[in-house]
Image: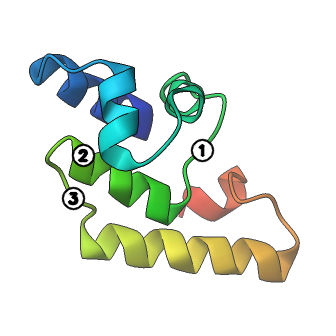
Amino acid sequence: MNFAEIVSTRLKALSMNQRQLAQRAGLTPMKVSRLLTGKEEPSLAVAESLLKAVGGALQPHLVDVVTYKTGLAHKKGLPVDSPELWEQ
């Protein structure tokens, strides 16, 4: 399950719509729509805001892995979503 699916599942469970989520997370409805349809990936800060808005939280070890992989991508000149980084 990807990030958008996790947040969407929580939205349904809470009987919340995207506009309500946007308001709780301090984002625009358009931004939330783009994130939940996979057209845009959230930064760590935005992911944390969205999860907090639906009663979840980022796990510290996950944040460490994402931060490490993002830094590694920049050092190697690779896109952050490069399979070479995430298949290990």
Residue under label 1, please give it.
Answer: 41
Earlier residue among tags 1 and 3: 1
For the residues labelled 2 and 3, the Cα–Cα distance comes to: 9 Å
Residue type pointed to by label 1: Glu
Q: Which is more foreground, mark 1 or mark 2?
A: 2
Q: Nearer the viewer, residue 48 or 20?
A: 20
Residue under label 2, please give it.
Answer: 53
Residue under label 3, please give it.
Answer: 57
At mark 2, the secondary structure is helix
Q: Is residue 2 visible?
A: no
Q: Nearer the viewer, residue 78 or 24?
A: 24
For the residues labelled 1 and 3, the Cα–Cα distance comes to: 17 Å
Q: Are marks 2 and 3 in contact (CB under 8 Å)?
A: no
Q: Nearer the viewer, residue 47 or 88?
A: 47
Q: Please state the horizontal and vertical placement of residue 80, each as a whole percent of the image.
A: 71, 59
Q: Please state the horizontal and vertical placement of residue 58, each as a whole percent of the image.
A: 28, 62
Residue type pointed to by label 3: Ala
Which numbered marker is on residue 52? none
Q: Compared to 39, does 47 lie above or below?
A: below
Q: Nearer the viewer, residue 64 or 25?
A: 25
Residue drawn at x 19%, y 29% is 10
Residue drawn at x 83%, y 64% is 78
At mark 3, the secondary structure is loop
Q: Compared to 15, does 86 lie above or below?
A: below
